[in-house]
């Protein structure tokens, strides 16, 4: 519908106003609570129908709490005074640089070049490369945008039919490696930092990048092994004979040697990961 965003926006605002100023406040809830509830209802409608950009909706919701007197400014924008938010912003910047320079694409293709050009080999390559890349980009969108086209290219090179078992399996391998394995590393997704930020300060100081990785290592190994076995069991084509790696080699040839920007980005990410691991030891 052409005007669906406008309609959704108007409905969201009307519902918010009704909840905040017309609906009687239930027993046990304050007017401030009703204002927060109203803003959440409006914000969710805005998010669902993409009335305005998601980040703008979030900021307007925080502003509405202050303007309408639900909470004070310090409480509403408290997240921006913590290290959690700035770690997320810094991580997103690193991820953007790694994606723009082509470093992430190079790492994925390089891993794939070492494994057989078959369903077994390339599904394993997608799982491994996705896991290696995960801690470098704390956002699902760029990883998905990069991983799934690679899976599509490999599927075409192996001669799999669109939406067939083989192509679907490689797509799932990309999703599994680039998204599911996010839980393995603290820096793999902004949500991990958000969860850490919800913990008491004394536990946040203990839950470093390295401790998170060690605690999640059993899950990581289990998820990789079971994920691979599940993919092979459900999606492996009957004829899984390895074919030529021309597609992968062609991609590597086209991107050429590492550029200066890629080297700088790789060095910065490596230093960041080392500092994340040693953060508690060096008090940084």
Image: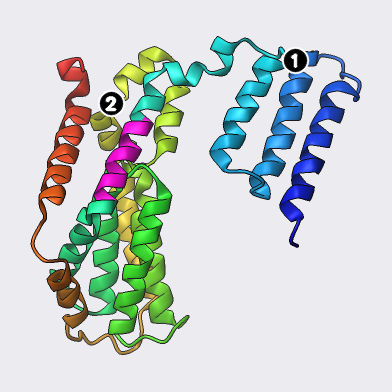
Foreground pick, 91 / 225: 91
Residue 188 placed where, x, y %? Answer: 34, 42
Which quadrant of the rendered structure holds the N terminus?
bottom right
Q: Is residue 92 magenta?
A: yes
Residue 14 placed where, x, y %? Answer: 83, 35
Residue 100 placed where, x, y %? Answer: 27, 52
Q: CA distance from mark 1 to mark 2?
A: 36 Å
Q: Can you see residue 218?
A: no
The image shows residue 46, relative to residue 221, as above or below, that is above
The image shows residue 210, relative to residue 113, as above or below, that is above
Secondary structure, mark 1, is helix
Residue at horizontal 39 percent and vertical 45 percent from the top: 139
Residue at horizontal 87 percent and vertical 19 percent from the top: 26
The image shows residue 132, relative to residue 253, as above or below, that is above
Q: Residues within 10 Å of mark 2 (few under 14, many from 20)?
A: some
Q: Main secondary structure of the magenta part?
A: helix
Foreground pick, 34 / 232: 34
Q: Can you see residue 162?
A: yes
Which quadrant of the rendered structure holds the C terminus?
top left
Q: Earlier in the sequence, mark 1 or mark 2?
A: 1
The quadrant where residue 184 appears: top left
Q: Which mark is residue 208?
A: 2
Residue 197 placed where, x, y %? Answer: 43, 23
The quadrant where residue 219 appears: top left
Disc 1 designates what residue? 32
The quadrant where residue 190 appears: top left
Residue at horizontal 45 percent and vertical 30 percent from the top: 194
- Magenta highlight range: 88-99
């Amino acid at each position: 519908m052409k005007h669906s965003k406008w309609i959704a926006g108007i409905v969201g605002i009307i519902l918010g106003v009704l909840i905040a100023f017309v609906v009687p406040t239930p027993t046990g809830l304050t007017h401030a609570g009703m204002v927060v509830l109203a803003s959440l209802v409006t914000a969710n409608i805005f998010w669902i129908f993409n009335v305005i950009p998601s980040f703008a909706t979030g900021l307007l919701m925080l502003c509405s709490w202050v303007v309408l007197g639900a909470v004070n400014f310090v409480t509403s924008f408290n997240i921006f005074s913590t290290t959690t938010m700035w770690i997320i912003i810094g991580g997103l910047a690193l991820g953007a640089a790694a994606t723009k320079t082509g470093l992430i694409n190079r790492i994925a293709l390089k891993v794939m070049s070492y494994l057989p050009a078959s369903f077994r080999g390339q599904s394993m390559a997608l799982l491994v490369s996705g896991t290696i890349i995960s801690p470098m980009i704390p956002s699902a969108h760029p990883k998905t945008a990069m991983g799934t086209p690679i899976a599509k290219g490999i599927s075409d090179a192996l001669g799999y039919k669109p939406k067939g078992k083989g192509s679907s399996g490689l797509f799932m391998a990309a999703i599994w490696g680039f998204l599911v394995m996010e839980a393995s590393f603290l820096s793999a997704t902004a949500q991990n930092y958000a969860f850490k930020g919800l913990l008491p300060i004394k536990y946040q100081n203990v839950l470093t990048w390295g401790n998170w990785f060690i605690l999640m290592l059993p899950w990581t190994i289990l998820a990789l092994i079971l994920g691979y076995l599940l993919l092979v069991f459900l999606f492996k084509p009957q004829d899984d004979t390895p074919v030529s790696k021309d597609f992968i080699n062609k991609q590597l040839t086209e991107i050429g040697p590492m550029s200066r920007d890629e080297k700088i980005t790789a060095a910065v990410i490596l230093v960041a990961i080392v500092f994340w691991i040693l953060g508690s030891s060096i008090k940084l």
